[in-house]
Image (cartoon, helix red, strand yellow):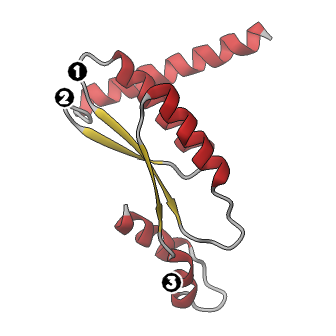
Amino acid sequence: MSSHRDAVDVLEQRLRRRIVRSIKTFGLIEEGDRVLVAVSGGKDSYGLLDLLARIRARSPFPFELVAVHLDQVQPGYDGVPLATWLAEFNAATGTPYEIVQRDTYSVVKRLTQEGGTYCAPCSRLRRGIL
């Protein structure tokens, strides 16, 4: 079991270093910045939020980190597990979060022609809201 944990630690350290290098190289985060992380519920957004919280904890300068989840009111979506995770993450790291509820689903469904895909209009609406 420890070899699995060691592999996870090595991967986390490698990702953290690369993110810090990118932040420094491209001036992505500066003192006093407020960084919004859109949390979809997927592994990539969970991972990014966690890594940025760890980076913030060791940063030589203060910056804010805020997690935001957009609940698009899709039928059958259960946002409780994600809301629970965000509350627990807030308790553990002090990272504030907000859950924004907007019915983009019915708008996208109305705008999309039969046989078309929801992806493009949905992503435009999401970015506009955030």
Residue 47 can be seen, yes or no: yes
Q: Quadrant of residue 87?
A: top right
**Label located before the other in sequence (3 or 1):** 1
Q: Quadrant of residue 125?
A: bottom left
Label 2 close to label 1 by CB (< 8 Å) = yes
For the residue labelled by badge 3, is the local secondary structure a helix, a strand or a loop? helix
Report the residue at 51% width, 88% height from top: 111
For the residue labelled by badge 2, is the local secondary structure a helix, a strand or a loop? loop
Report the residue at 35% width, 68% height from top: 128
Label 2 – label 1 distance at C-alpha = 5 Å
Where is residue 5 shown, x and y percent of the image? 70, 14
Query: Is 83 in front, or is 30?
Result: 83
Label 3 – label 1 distance at C-alpha = 42 Å
**Label located before the other in sequence (2 or 1):** 2
Q: Residue under label 1, please give it.
A: 61
The kind of residue on which mark 2 rests is Glu
**Count of numbered marks:** 3
Tag 2: Cα neighbours inside 10 Å, few (<14), some, or many (≥20)? few
Where is residue 91 shown, x and y percent of the image? 50, 30
The kind of residue on which mark 3 rests is Val
Q: Tell which residue pokes out farthest to the top in this image.
A: 2
Up-down relation of residue 69 to residue 110 (above or below): above
Q: Which mark is residue 31?
A: 2
**Label located before the other in sequence (2 or 3):** 2
Report the residue at 50% width, 75% height from top: 104
From the image, which quarter does the C terminus lie in?
bottom left
The kind of residue on which mark 1 rests is Phe
Label 2 – label 3 distance at C-alpha = 39 Å
Q: Is residue 6 left or right of residue 65?
A: right
Q: Is residue 128 left or right of residue 110?
A: left
Where is residue 101 shown, x and y percent of the image? 49, 66
Q: Residue under label 3, please give it.
A: 107
